[in-house]
Image: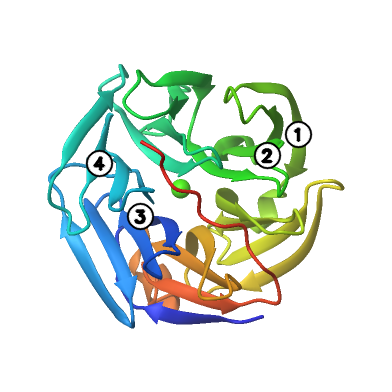
Amino acid sequence: MQAEILFDAQAALGEGPAWDAKTQTLYWVDILGKRVHAWKDGRDDFLQLDEFVGCVAPRRDGGLVAALHASFWTFGRRGDQRAFLASVSEPAANRFNDGKCDPAGRLLAGTMDMEEKSASGNLYSLISNSPPRKLLEGIRISNGLAWSPDHKIFYYIDTPTRQVRAFDYDLDTGDLSNPRVAVDVPASMGWPDGMTSDMEGRLWIALWGGARVSRWDPATGRCEAEIPVPALQTSSCVFGGPRRDILYVTSARVGMDESALAKYPLSGGVFQIQTQTEGMPTFEFAG
Ligand code: CA
């Protein structure tokens, strides 16, 4: 498997890729650039916002749901018709980071201290316009989220722990229980960041600082494959394309010095990897 450049976006902090099957569109965000990107038919358009955007997800009714600095919003198809859903009470230094919808249509999104020091982040679950529910607290950098093919296990990454934790997931209630460690990522591979899963139950994890994505078996904790990406700070990944077998990978330029940028000039780009695997779908927001 090889990573190819899809779009040389030069993004500060490209993140949160989501595949909208209805429109065959790859959505992704530049969190620090405050942009929501939409890549379709070989062309990338973006919506410029006035605050950080941690993540977006397609809605069942069309358009997007987004976690901005500390609040949830919906957007119409063209980025218009912005509507407030809910806000969260967080320290001023916190913002939303990675997030994703569960198979029942809830949006799960977590926060982080922008200075990456305090474990003051939380993981929230939002359904429609009800008050957000706190699922986890004491989080440093809330990142990758994924579900098993039977939707009974939720996988979650708090990046500084270098671990993927697994929880039993009750799809009816959205409750988490029975936490355990599924994967320990060695320091030599980089920091586990964004994550997705495939129909065989494997986890695909972007490794920040590792210039690669990796495939893991959460049943054994073993790494089964590593695919180099010509961007040092690979940040997240999602399956998309007509057969949902293309892995799209985001990356970031923020914090890299001149020599690192010279070595990885495509940092901040979006990449594609043709796999032999059918990925899990991007679930849509039901609200
Ligand atoms: Ca991330």
Residue type pointed to by label 3: Gly
- Mark 4 Cβ inside 8 Å of ligand 1: no
Q: Disc 4 vs disc 2: which is toward the camera?
A: 4
Name which residue lies at 17% across and 36% down: 83
Q: How far is the residue under mark 1 from the one under mark 4?
A: 34 Å
> Farthest residue in the front direction?
61
Quarter in which the N terminus is drawn = bottom right
Point out the tag, 3 or 2, that comes first from the N-terminus: 2
> Which percent across, then down, holds residue 40?
33, 75
Q: Mark 4 points at which residue?
A: 74
Residue type pointed to by label 2: Gln
Name which residue lies at 62% across and 35% down: 161
Quadrant of residue 52 within the rendered picture: top left
Residue 163 is marked as 2
Residue type pointed to by label 1: Val
Q: How far is the residue under mark 3 from the one under mark 2?
A: 23 Å
